[in-house]
Image (tube, rainbow, N blue to C red):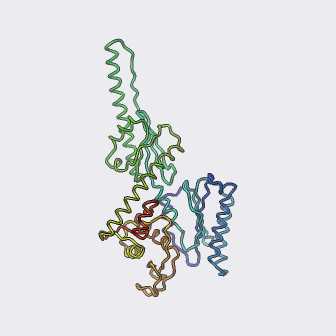
Amino acid sequence: MVLKGDLDALVGFKPVTGSPVLSIYLDVDQSNSANLNRGFEVSLKNALRGVEQQLGDDKARLSAFQEDADRVWDFVSAYTPAGKGLVAMSDASEGYFWHRNLQVPMPNEAHWAAKPYVRPLVEARDEFARYGVILTDRRQARLFIVFLNEVEETRETLARFRVKQFKSPGMDRIWSQMVFQRKANEHAKWHLKKVVKMMARLEEEQEFDRLILGGPTEAVSVLETLLTDRLRSRLIGLASLPVEASEKDILEETNRLEQEHQRQSEKELVDLLLTAAAKDRRAVTGLGPTVRAAVEGRVMSLVYEEGRQEAGGECARCETLFEGQPQPCPHCGGYVDRVDDLMERLVESAVKTGESVELVRGEAAETLEREGGGIGAFLRF
């Protein structure tokens, strides 16, 4: 599991001159036949070979890379798959090694650079956002927090009171049934109010953005009317799940709802971005304007299409990013190095300064590519 602190630490990593970090991402999902019988080791070998070929005949760098590659290889050789994705970072010369199992798919890729490569983690965090789930009936409830397709936290509660019904003749029996039903409804409502309070506290602690409800229609309908304004604003759908559903079924059904909501939200986001940029209302599209806005610290939210690849430049002295590779740096006169993955720099900068990163897929990505050059940003000013 990757926690927020993990990503903050990776982004804040202090590079050591002459000591790059090897970043490995692997698809280890055992439901993928290519990964059976440790087939993911072949993917690792190919990814490492790709980095090695980029280093050419530089013996010193090849030797340093091999140290990191050997350390990762030793780890993966003894690794037992425990999820769908694996990420590992290694800098053998500094004694640094970090890894996490993920319950979401990861690409097969390797990067050897001054800092850990974080773009796949940031994109996974955007795609598999943190959300809350409440499964309840009139007597019991189960509350979950889901992040990166994994249950982070679970809480349960039962109604305290049981209403007993006594058999009696005639009108007394009818009256008894009415009293029984009224008290049962009151206790059910007390129970559901308690559930709302518990989830409100969880939301304060975990800061999730979306909420899904599940359970019998009657109980869920009442629960929905009792939600606080803050929780109601996060409600994205109702799941067809019983209270006693397995964790596997909960993840499958709620992830389906979350993904449907995500795709629709992305279409609305891109439409809003394109409209705002066209009217020059604190938004830009296209690589050049987006990079300049990022350098000027004006970006509030970075938006780009899935799989976007861009090369550019970065000043070795002042670290300013450029769409191209001007020489010398127009800001400080320093030398501008080529950056093969400019998107990684933009994403890393966004995370470091607290900006949101919005990766769009499907129809939204096609629209952004066609009408906005595949990338844009909402601006602070």
The location of residue 155, given as percent across then percent down, is 46, 43
Using the image, determine if residue 154 lies above or below residue 329: above
Q: Is residue 94 above or below residue 203?
A: below
- Total number of numbered discs in the rendering: 0
Does 265 sit left or right of 147 as displayed? left
Quadrant of residue 164 within the rendered picture: top left
Report the side of 248 relative to 259 (left or right).
Answer: right
Q: Is residue 6 left or right of residue 281?
A: right
Front-lying residue, 357 or 153: 357
Quarter of the rendering containing residue 275 = bottom left
The residue under the point 32% across, 22% down is 178
Where's residue 364, x and y in %?
42, 61
Q: Which residue is depicted at the point 45% across and 40% down?
A: 240
Name the residue at 39% across, 49% down: 236
> x, y (%) of residue 78?
68, 58
Image x and y of residue 329, in percent: 44, 85
Q: Quadrant of the N terminus?
A: bottom right
Question: Looking at the figure, which quarter contains the C terminus?
Answer: bottom left
In the rendered structure, the answer to whether residue 228 lies left or right of residue 311 reads left
Q: Nearer the viewer, residue 370 or 16?
A: 370
Instruction: Name the one closer to the observer, 57 or 190.
Output: 57
Question: Which residue ends up furthest to the front in the rendered image?
Answer: 370
